[in-house]
Amino acid sequence: MLTVSVKWQKEVFKAVEIDTSQPPYVFKCQLYDLTGVPPERQKIMVKGGLLKDDADWSTVGVKQGQKLMMMGTADEVVKAPEKGPVFMEDLPEEEQVVSLGHSAGLFNLGNTCYMNSTVQCLHSVPELKSALVKYSHSGRSNDLDQTSHMLTVATRDLFNELDKSVKPVAPMQFWMVLRKKYPQFGQLHNGVFMQQDAEECWTQLLYTLSQSLRSPGSSENLDAIKDIFGIELASRIHCQESGEESSERESVYSLKCHISQEVNHLHEGLKHGLKSELEKASPALGRSAIYLKESRINGLPRYLTIQFVRFFWKRESNQKAKILRKVDYPLELDVYDLCSDELRKQLEVPRQNLRDEEGKKLGLKADEKSSAPKDGDVKMTDAEGSSKASGESSATTSQGGVPAEKETHLTGIYDLVAVLTHKGRSADSGHYVAWVKQESGKWIEFDDDNPIPQREEDIVKLSGGGDWHMAYICMYKARTVSI
């Protein structure tokens, strides 16, 4: 340790210690504290020139008691702000939510992680929130039972509370009404509420909302849940033995990803899920026969929900056992080849326009300032206002030469916005967690009352293959274009 004096402008700083075991940069930081001159602006004269940040003290030749000369201008003194700093905890709670960039967590009320993760995923859908906001306390229709009405109100109020709160929310009212509507969620074992299947909770909640958010007397939002999540399937049912063939159409709220030894990727599992065998009576044969059912997507939703069929009933243990196989899933999912020929034709123009628009973004940025939008230009949007097929008109008819508004069209391309995972060996045990993409583009892991920021590249690693969290339900948001 050496002691030196340093002259800077008209001041002399005496007895400044130099720790020769540390690089000169540390000494410059000491001088910064004394003078306010940042290290990068300091010019300290030593034998042989200026003192470098990474010089070796043994070769610099500084001696005990030596007087060093330093040049350099200090940073401008920062004036104290007129208003003192405002800490986040002092902000109103709604402003804290905006600052955080994500909503609150949910307390686990006793094996309720299945419910919490379901709520967090569905809470991320703005169109569902909008439909719930329009639902009034007293607006129950005559054909809707009281518990369905109560569960809808509880869902709306819980979503609202999550949006306004920074601290974790206790979903007591929602849980109480959910158990009243669906008693299976109130099962007890040794006096403790049992873990339940998150997919069953998701399905039952959407079914209830599909009944309550239906507006028979209104021209818009005739069936809000079907409009947001409904998938139209066109199926061909064929019996090879008798040659009989029939077709049917149905509406579902999710696609199934079937998992087998041949399935390594979500797309392969979806193809398996659209084919099934069923046994039913054959009029031509006069007995039961095997029929092959092959389905194609004939109408797309704004939000595409996919369930990984990971659980099956195991007779030996009398419980739902879990398939741990790794099945990869993408951040961007294209379902074009799973669609019917009719729907593919409707998707062709929007898909081409989407490719053109993305090409412009990548290659024609320089022309953006000079080129005004033209009538044929396409604007990419989110799924707000989109329809069942390639696009339902959101436009008004042009009159008197006034251009009509553009229509929003689906493209068959979807972006991942939420993943519900399960950790453990059985659907009725283990732990469920929601991983949700925020409007800012950041991902948050909602582990009950604990929201944790995550990197996007880590979200697709929840694909299984071990005892870690693996995707059980994925939710994708439609990528649309306005034409």
Image (cartoon, rainbow, N blue to C red):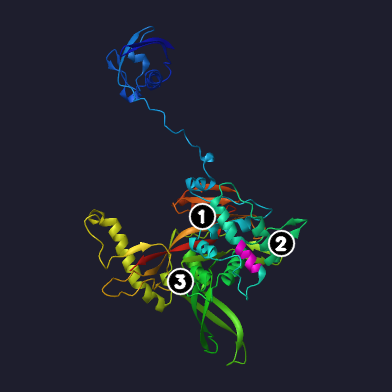
Label 2 sits on residue: 186
In the image, residue 440 lies in the stretch drawn in magenta: no
Task: Please give the name of the residue rendered at 43% of the width and 77% of the height, measured from the top-left corner.
Answer: 340
The kind of secondary structure element at disc 1 is strand
State the residue in front, 384 or 258: 384
- Cβ–Cβ under 8 Å for marks 1 and 2: no
- Sort mark 2 into few (<14), some (14-19) or many (20+) by Cα contacts within 10 Å: some
Q: Which quarter of the image is occupied by the C terminus? A: bottom left
Q: Which residues are magenta?
A: 147-153
Label 3 sits on residue: 300
Residue 436 is tagged as: 1
Where 80 sits versus 318, above or below? above
- Sort mark 1 into few (<14), some (14-19) or many (20+) by Cα contacts within 10 Å: many
Where 37 sits versus 358, above or below? above
Q: Which quarter of the image is occupied by the N terminus? A: top left
The kind of secondary structure element at disc 3 is loop
Tell me which amino acid carries mark 2: Gly
Residue 260 is tagged as: none
Q: Is residue 265 visible?
A: no
List x then y, in percent, for residue 203: 59, 67
Marked residue nearer the N-terminal end (1 or 3): 3
Q: Is residue 36 visible?
A: yes
Tell me which amino acid carries mark 1: Val
State the residue in front, 91 or 19: 91
Marked residue nearer the N-terminal end (1 or 2): 2
Count every numbered label the image shows and give the total.
3
